[in-house]
Image (tube, helix red, strand yellow):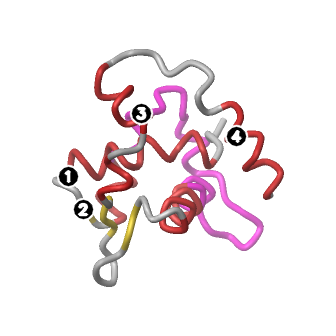
Amino acid sequence: MIPNQYEIEIPLLKCLEELGGKGKPKEIYSRIGKFFPNLTEADRAETVSSGGNKWTNRVQWARQALVNRDEMTSPEYGVWEITPKGRSRPEMATAASGAPNRGAGEASTQQNALLW
């Protein structure tokens, strides 16, 4: 099952951190999957009604949500970059420490569900 948009946000920010703060979408798509070990090849091959890839579409929507909150930016065409606000996101500190982040996304996931 493909993770929801909110579940992709922190791994997306972490991928950017691993890439030195910015990267190209193709690099990110190939790296972000490691954060979702239950993501199957069938999930990765699933398409949306327009014919596009559902997994990359979901990553793109997560990116757009982060851009809207100034946690990511695009300094040039085809480049995604984490911002200082994205680096200071509380979940990033929790994820970096290895401590579990139980429940932190539940309220926001519910809020995002209301938006969609």
Label 2: how many residues lie within 10 Å, few (<14), some (14-19) or many (20+)? many
- Say the numbered circle drawn on residue 22: 2
Label 4: how many residues lie within 10 Å, few (<14), some (14-19) or many (20+)? some
Kind of element beneath mark 4? helix
Marks 2 and 3, how far apart at CA:
18 Å
Of all residues, the one furthest to the left in this rendering is 20
Q: Identify the residue position indicated by label 4 in the image.
A: 109
Kind of element beneath mark 1? loop
Q: Magenta segment range?
A: 31-58
Q: Quadrant of residue 25?
A: bottom left
What amino acid does circle 2 point to? Lys
Q: Identify the residue position indicated by label 3 in the image.
A: 35
What amino acid does circle 4 point to? Thr
Q: Residue at x 38, y 52 (%)?
A: 86
Q: Quadrant of the N terminus?
A: top right
Mark 3 and mark 4 lie on one chain; the one further toward the N terminus is 3
Q: Residue 69, position in %: x, y?
A: 52, 62
What amino acid does circle 1 point to? Leu
Q: Identify the residue position indicated by label 1 in the image.
A: 19
The one nearer the camera, 12 or 39, is 12
Kind of element beneath mark 3? helix
What amino acid does circle 3 point to? Phe
Tell me whether circle 1 and circle 2 mark residues in contact (CB < 8 Å): yes
The one nearer the camera, 79 or 115, is 115
Q: Is residue 90 magenta?
A: no
Marks 1 and 2, how far apart at CA:
6 Å
Q: Residue at x 60, y 56 (%)?
A: 58
Mark 4 and mark 1 lie on one chain; the one further toward the N terminus is 1
Marks 3 and 4, how far apart at CA:
18 Å
User: Up-down: is 53 above or below 35?
Assistant: below
Q: Quadrant of the C terminus?
A: bottom right
Marks 3 and 1, how far apart at CA:
15 Å
